[in-house]
Image (tube, coloured by chain):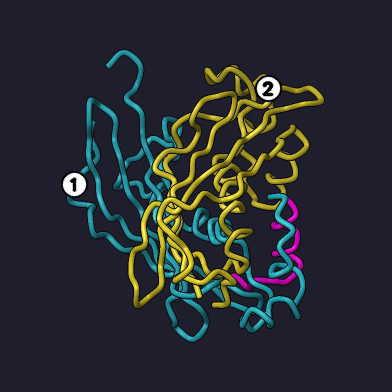
């Protein structure tokens, strides 16, 4: 059954703050094989004009993806997660994420469409700092493939 | 932002230095730990095959993270990249051997977007085993 269009625009409550730590950024940068000193060396980051080490561009996904569980597990929406694949992903920055940020995510359903039995759901995660400032928006599209035999 | 490249000196069509990223099973285990994404399709061959994949595949987000390094290395300051989006078109299949897989990244300045904001759009081409693994892979970079 196609997903209900009336869910477009539904917004979920902000998540508990996630504190971005220097060592977590270091671990993540190492895991993606990125040796840019802006991620690990405070002096290098400050030379570039940042208040502390910054996080790699895709790092917010570590926070925004778990936040989308609210949407994916929403019983009223009825998304079958066993059929879901990650279709696309985008980050739109107001400013870089840096160590010391306490980030909270507000998820919203941006769009739902159904094509040939496949459901496409676009979910935004707006990321705010502890002062209420908007830092970055992560937008992901999930694709729920049509069940076998339909 | 402190990009070292000057907007005035960059032309549309400028090619970025390409990047080659080797990916082994160990890479995926490390990324799983750092990102918190422990989906078994990224480390368990038996499970991956049961759900219809040819083998273990890399996290799409790992591929996305690897590819943008070409742009952040070029720009100097990773904070100069203000927008980055990709479509996941094909999985990067990672066999359990010494070589694993190789992600090839190339790209060029597709357009100068805004003279006042000094932004350019970089289009990335990301392949593995001669197949495009990311589609519509684009970044907006704010230059000096």
Q: Nearer the viewer, residue A131 or B132?
A: B132
- Residue A77: give x, y in percent of width and height: 30, 46
Q: Is residue A68 visible from the viewing direction of this image? A: no
Q: Nearer the viewer, residue A74 or B133?
A: B133
Image: A10 above or below B65: below
Q: Which mark is residue B45?
A: 2
The residue shown at (54%, 77%) is B1
The chain drawn in yellow is B
The residue shown at (70%, 57%) is A28
Q: Is residue A80 left or right of residue A8?
A: right
Task: Please identify the residue farthest to the top as the structure is shown.
Answer: A149
Magenta range is: A18-31
Image: B92 above or below A25: above
Instruction: Give the colour chain A carries in the figure.
Output: cyan
Crowd band around label 1 with a 10 angstrom C-alpha radius: few (<14), some (14–19), many (20+): few
Q: Give the label, 2 or 1, closer to the camera.
A: 2
- Residue A41: give x, y in percent of width and height: 77, 73
Q: Quadrant of residue B89?
A: top left
Q: Is residue A142 left or right of residue A29?
A: left
Q: Is residue B83 visible from the viewing direction of this image? A: yes
> Marks 2 and 1, Cα distance to the nearest angstrom?
37 Å
The residue shown at (45%, 68%) is A93
């Amino acid at each position: 059954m196609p997903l209900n269009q009336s869910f477009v625009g539904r917004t979920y409550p902000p998540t508990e703050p996630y504190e971005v730590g220097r060592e977590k950024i270091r671990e993540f940068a190492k895991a993606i094989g990125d040796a840019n000193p802006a991620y690990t060396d405070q002096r290098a980051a400050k030379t570039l004009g940042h208040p502390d080490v910054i996080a790699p561009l895709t790092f917010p996904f570590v926070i925004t993806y778990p936040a989308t569980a609210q949407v994916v597990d929403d019983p009223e929406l009825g998304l079958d997660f066993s059929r879901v694949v990650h279709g696309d992903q985008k980050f739109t920055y107001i400013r870089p994420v840096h160590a010391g940020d306490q980030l909270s995510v507000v998820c919203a359903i941006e769009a739902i469409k159904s094509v040939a039995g496949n459901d496409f759901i676009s979910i935004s995660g707006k990321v705010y700092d502890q002062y209420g400032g908007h830092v970055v928006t992560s937008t992901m599209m999930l694709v729920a493939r049509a069940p076998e035999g339909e | 932002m402190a990009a070292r490249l000057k907007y005035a000196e960059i032309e549309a069509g400028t090619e970025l230095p390409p990047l080659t990223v080797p990916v082994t099973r160990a890479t995926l285990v490390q990324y799983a730990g750092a990102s918190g994404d422990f989906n078994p399709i990224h480390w368990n061959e038996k499970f991956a095959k049961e759900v219809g994949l040819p083998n273990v595949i890399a996290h799409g987000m790992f591929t996305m993270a690897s590819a943008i390094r070409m742009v952040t290395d070029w720009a100097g300051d990773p904070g100069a990249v203000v927008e980055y989006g990709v479509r996941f078109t094909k999985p990067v299949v990672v066999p359990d051997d010494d070589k694993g897989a190789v992600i090839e990244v190339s790209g060029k300045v597709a357009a100068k977007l805004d003279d006042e904001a000094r932004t350019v759009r970089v289009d990335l081409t990301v392949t593995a085993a001669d197949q495009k693994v990311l589609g519509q892979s684009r970044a907006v970079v704010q230059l000096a």
